[in-house]
């Protein structure tokens, strides 16, 4: 009986030490690695929805359904509001909104920032983000932007996730503003 108490005491002491030791072995994923393989386009026109919180409305043109938004990092962009954006006429300049954007992603393997062009000459590509992680089983594509912010997208079954890996370059093109919700006036 005395040995059982001694064994329990050892396990009780060793458990937190082992937990800390194992936790120190984990490292977060990084997107600044050089992907393997030749420079190429992996896939184009990957449709995703991106949600941007705390975006400021700079100006609005209700007749043409155009809105200029300023993001937290200071970038400004003009978007065409889709027909599904409700109460567009009630949004005012200065409003803080949550914006949902329809985007198309193109994923590349780049060598020194270039990919072979149609004429065979290297073509420069300016990446908006890099692949941070890929999870084919749950159809998840995680991206990391230059400011360090990460965003994860659920993608369709047609996306070639098994060909993508951390470090691949991503070019994002916003096609439409699909939802706005005023957070603060």
Image (cartoon, grey):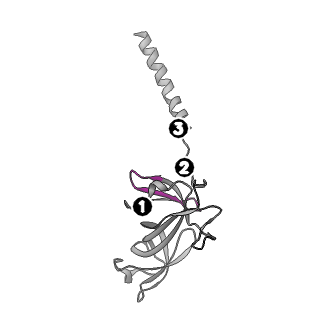
Q: CA distance from mark 1 to mark 2?
A: 21 Å
Task: Determine which residue is flagged by label 1.
Answer: 159
* Percent position of residue 83, x then y: 35, 80
90 and 30: which is toward the camera: 30
Which is more foreground, mark 3 or mark 1? 1
Q: Is residue 24 above or below residue 36?
A: above
Which mark sits nearer the N-terminus, 3 or 2?
A: 3
Cβ atoms under marks 1 and 2 closer than 8 Å: no
Q: Tell whether 117 sits left or right of 101.
A: right
Residue 121 % position (x, y): 63, 71
Circles 3 and 1: CB atoms closer than 8 Å: no
Mark 1 residue element: loop
Q: Which residue corresponds to mark 3?
A: 23
Mark 1 / mark 2, whichever is N-terminal: 2
How far from the left and from the top, in percent, is residue 23?
A: 53, 37
Q: Earlier in the sequence, mark 3 or mark 1?
A: 3
Marks 3 and 1, how far apart in space?
A: 33 Å
Give yes or no for residue 40 being in the magenta stretch: no
Q: Would residue 72 be seen by someone viewing this image from the given angle?
A: yes
Q: Residues within 10 Å of mark 1 (few under 14, many from 20)?
A: some
- Decide: few, some or many residues near mark 3? Use Cα within 10 Å; few <14, some 14-19, many ≥20: few
**Residue at image mark 2:** 29
Residue span colored magenta: 134-149
Magenta span contains residue 141: yes
Q: Nearer the viewer, residue 140 or 92?
A: 140
């Amino acid at each position: 009986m005395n040995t059982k108490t001694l064994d329990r005491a050892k396990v009780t002491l060793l458990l937190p030490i082992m937990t800390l030791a194992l936790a120190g072995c984990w490292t977060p994923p990084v997107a600044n690695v050089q992907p393997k393989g030749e420079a190429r386009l992996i896939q184009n026109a990957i449709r995703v929805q991106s949600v941007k919180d705390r975006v400021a409305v700079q100006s609005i043109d209700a007749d043409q359904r155009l809105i200029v938004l300023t993001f937290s990092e200071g970038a400004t962009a003009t978007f065409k509001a889709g027909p599904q954006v409700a109460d567009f006429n009630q949004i005012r300049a200065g409003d803080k909104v949550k914006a949902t954007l329809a985007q198309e992603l193109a994923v590349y393997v780049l060598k020194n920032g270039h990919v072979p062009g149609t004429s065979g000459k290297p073509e420069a590509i300016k990446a908006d983000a890099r692949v941070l992680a890929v999870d084919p089983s749950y159809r998840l594509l995680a991206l990391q932007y230059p400011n360090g912010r990460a965003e994860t997208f659920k993608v369709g079954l047609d996306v070639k996730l098994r060909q993508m890996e951390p470090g691949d370059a991503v070019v994002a093109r916003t096609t439409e503003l699909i939802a706005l919700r005023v957070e603060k006036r």
